[in-house]
Amino acid sequence: MHLEIDPSSPDPLFDQIASALRGALKSGELKPGDHLPPAKAVASALRVNLHTVLRAYAILRDEGLIEVRRGRGSVVVDSDHATFRRRLDEAIGQVVTEARRLGLGPDEAADMVRRAF
């Protein structure tokens, strides 16, 4: 897989990397179960700091598009899983907004979620 970034772009490098990887997912170049290249290899190929690539991978992880497995690499997740993860993140955001509106702190809200399980 070939990733390109534009150092002169106003967009942060980590956003450019994440965007390029999203494009590879959309185009089918990357499929569920595929391993992303190691962050060190991407950093070296793009001549960027390792933490820049790790931040891009963290963004994709937070979006539910990849799973980062310590010591085993980053893997593209099933798109159904990513859709579920996005919906769950949105629902949690709504719960947090409502908890704040009611004056609940994070511990109280977390206790309510735990009891619901």
Image (cartoon, rainbow, N blue to C red):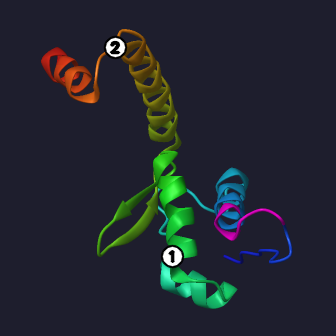
Q: Residues within 10 Å of mark 1 (few under 14, many from 20)?
A: few
Write the residue at 52% across / 45% down: 63
**Cα–Cα span, label 2 and label 1:** 37 Å
Q: What type is the residue that disc 1 sits on?
A: His
Q: Secondary structure at mark 2?
A: loop
Return the mark for residue 51. Answer: 1
Quarter holding the C terminus is top left
Q: Position of residue 95 (x, y in %)?
A: 39, 18
* Disc 2: which residue: 103
- Which comes sooner in the sequence, label 2 or label 1? 1
Q: Secondary structure at mark 1?
A: helix
Write the residue at 30% across / 69% down: 70
Farthest right residue in view: 8
Quarter holding the N terminus is bottom right
Q: Identify the magenta region.
A: 10-15
Q: Position of residue 114 (x, y in %)?
A: 16, 24
Write the residue at 42% across / 11% down: 101
Q: Magenta stretch containing residue 31, yes or no? A: no
In the rendered view, does 111 fall on the left or right side of 30?
left
Image-quadrant location for residue 4? bottom right
Q: What type is the residue that disc 2 sits on?
A: Gly
